[in-house]
């Protein structure tokens, strides 16, 4: 049996982009149905368990008002619910985990609680419906518009078909693009196609995609033994070494992503707290016991999203379902194998032999029985063929040699900042990690070349394999989604198509006014940041 529904705006995917899209559409008065494949909202921040990678100057600039509110609500959650030391609670820049990857590292379930809090006011009136554990399985189109999308409930097996005036794809892999037959791109473009300095020199390769990672949380108590059962594929991963890697995958040796020179970084040897310094334990630590009275908590909690769990043996987009599942299993086995190696065979920092059996998998923190994150961490999605595609020439420092700052976009709907950061790929290529300028998000990158009522709302906008590397991070995805939700609401209010908003000067100016005046967007970087290259780590 299929159940029929209707709404103003349908958002498939409850990651950061999907939630942000819902918030802006709701704030502008529209009815929304938001669906999510897992039982947690938040995507890369929560179900994929990745502490936020943010703009270097995030405390001062580089985010929308709602993303700033989210960050402050996270800090407030810890101040109100955790027994922090008074001086820690009073810190306006409280970093709950004191991880050195970000100025705000925190537990995934806190992110879930805050996102639910932000959406809660819209639920009582049913202006917002949230369907958890639903996946899109079909889309009905007529000419250049989506008429409806059908979802399958992963708990009941029932089908639900939703007719909507505007449809936003915020799925982690850009699933609606394929289901609706929207023109899109996967993998790596060639230099002949894009002219990008770091694009492929030969032919384009759709199966050349960034590594995926199955993240997990750990604590550690010396003297205890929490060793897991030996993973099924442990023997393979123990011996595996990629041609471009300096040692076996399961080792403390990796590559510096910028210089590509071998480096050594272990678990506990360098407990500094400066950003992007130190050992792995402090790198993505999400709970710091030192914020509390001594003895209250037995251990820190850290989040494992390290080079050792980057899985690049094959892609999960553009392949059969069987091959996709094979690679998902491989990524899970790699993560479990790293844990087992650390527990049993890793050289210790204190010279006392091998292994840290006191490492304990914290599935209670990530909300799973198997102990890892609920979902794979996806760095690269399907991407729409857009009215405008962001190229390396628009944002890359080296590619813009002789020019000042990033390309200025008249149709800006937000800003972001991060290096062009690509992890090793499924085609056997190493890191691409190069400087970029603080950039804008052009509205043209959110407009499909043909479809009229479909908008991208996360990493599936009009970027390339290269520029996806700086447009894929947490606050940028949030901004993309929030802009898409606002655009959908604006189009319904004015009776316009998205491309009409972008390509008509007075409509574009009016819409940008809605973004800045009503929703608190920043459309351009303050002058003191605009010309600064993204710092290296």
Image: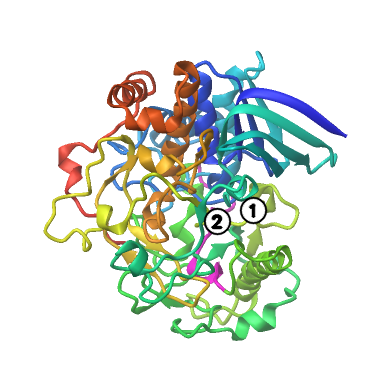
User: Farthest residue in the front direction?
Assistant: 143
Q: Give the alpha-carbon distance from disc 1 to disc 2, as whole Å.
A: 9 Å
Residue 311 counted in the magenta span: yes
Q: Marks 2 and 1: in contact by CB < 8 Å?
A: yes
Q: Is residue 104 visible?
A: no
Residue 26 image point, x, y percent: 53, 21
On the picture, is 398 further left or further right than 380?
left
Residue at the spot x=35%, y=32% of the render? Answer: 502
The reply to whether the magenta stretch includes residue 230 is no
In this view, the residue farthest toward the top is 125
Locate residue 95: give its quadrant: top left
Compared with 79, 459 (above or below) is below
Q: Nearer the viewer, residue 498 or 343?
A: 498
Badge 1, how many Cα within 10 Å: few under 14, some, many 20+? many
Give me the residue at 75% from left, 53% from top. 369
In the rendered view, tell whether residue 480 sits above or below residue 384: above
Residue 378, which numbered label? 2
**Element under disc 2:** loop
Q: Quadrant of residue 9?
A: top right
Residue 168, position as x, y percentages in the image: 55, 36
Give the number of the mark in front: 1 or 2. 2
Q: How far across and how far down the image is residue 24, in percent? A: 48, 25
Q: Quadrant location of the C terminus?
A: bottom left
Q: Considering the numbered disc 1 on the image, is that residue within a helix, a strand or a loop?
A: loop
* In the foreground, 340 or 145: 145
Q: In x, y percent, where is residue 344?
A: 64, 77
Residue 248 vertical position relative to residue 280 in the rendered view, above or below: below
Q: Label for residue 375?
A: 1
Q: Please indicate whether residue 326 sits to the left or right of residue 76 in the image.
A: right
Task: Write the start and end of the magenta stretch as one range.
Answer: 293-312
């Amino acid at each position: 049996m299929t159940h029929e529904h209707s709404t103003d705006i349908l958002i498939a995917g409850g990651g950061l982009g999907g939630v942000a899209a819902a918030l802006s559409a709701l704030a502008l008065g529209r009815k929304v149905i938001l669906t999510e494949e897992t039982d947690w909202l938040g995507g890369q921040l929560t179900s994929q368990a990745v502490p936020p990678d943010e703009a270097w100057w995030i405390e001062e600039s580089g985010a929308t008002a709602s993303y700033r509110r989210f960050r402050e609500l996270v800090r407030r959650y810890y101040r109100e619910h955790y027994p922090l030391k008074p001086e820690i609670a009073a810190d306006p820049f409280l970093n709950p985990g004191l991880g050195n990857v970000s100025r705000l590292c925190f537990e995934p379930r806190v992110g879930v609680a805050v996102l639910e809090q932000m959406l809660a006011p819209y639920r009582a009136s049913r202006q917002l419906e949230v369907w958890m554990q639903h996946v899109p399985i079909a889309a009905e189109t007529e000419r250049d518009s989506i008429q409806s999308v059908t979802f399958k409930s992963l708990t009941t097996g029932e089908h639900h078909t939703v007719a909507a005036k505007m449809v936003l794809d915020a799925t982690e892999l850009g699933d609606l693009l394929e289901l609706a037959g929207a023109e899109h791109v996967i993998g790596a473009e060639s230099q002949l196609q894009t002219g990008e300095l770091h694009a492929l020199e030969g032919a384009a390769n759709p199966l050349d995609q960034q590594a995926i990672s199955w993240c997990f949380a750990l604590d550690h108590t010396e003297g205890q033994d929490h060793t897991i059962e030996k993973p099924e594929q442990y023997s393979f991963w123990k011996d595996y070494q990629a041609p471009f890697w300096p040692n076996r995958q399961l080792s403390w040796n990796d590559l510096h992503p910028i210089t590509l020179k071998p480096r050594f970084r272990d678990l506990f040897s360098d407990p500094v707290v400066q950003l992007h310094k130190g050992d792995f334990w402090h790198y993505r630590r999400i709970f710091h016991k030192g914020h509390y009275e001594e003895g209250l908590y037995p251990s820190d909690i850290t989040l494992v999203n390290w080079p050792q769990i980057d899985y690049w043996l094959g892609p999960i987009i553009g392949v059969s379902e069987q091959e996709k599942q094979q690679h998902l299993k491989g990524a899970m086995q790699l993560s479990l194998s790293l844990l087992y190696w650390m527990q049993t065979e890793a050289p210790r920092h204190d010279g006392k032999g091998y292994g840290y059996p006191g490492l304990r998998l914290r599935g209670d923190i990530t909300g799973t029985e198997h102990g890892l994150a609920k979902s794979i961490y996806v760095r690269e999605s399907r991407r729409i063929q857009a009215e405008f595609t962001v190229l390396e020439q628009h944002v890359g420092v080296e590619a813009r040699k002789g020019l000042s700052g990033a390309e200025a976009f008249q149709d800006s709907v937000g800003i972001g900042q991060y290096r062009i950061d690509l992890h090793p790929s499924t085609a056997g290529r190493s890191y691409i990690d190069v400087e970029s300028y603080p950039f804008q998000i052009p509205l043209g990158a959110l407009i499909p070349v043909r479809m009229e009522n479909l908008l991208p709302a996360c990493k599936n906008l009009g970027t390339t394999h290269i520029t996806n590397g700086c447009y894929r991070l947490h606050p940028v995805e949030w901004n993309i989604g929030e802009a898409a939700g606002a655009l959908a609401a604006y189009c319904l209010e004015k009776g316009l198509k998205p491309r009409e908003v972008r390509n008509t000067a007075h409509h574009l100016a009016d819409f940008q006014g809605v973004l800045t005046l009503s929703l608190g967007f920043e459309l351009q970087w303050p002058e003191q940041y605009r010309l600064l290259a993204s710092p290296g780590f």
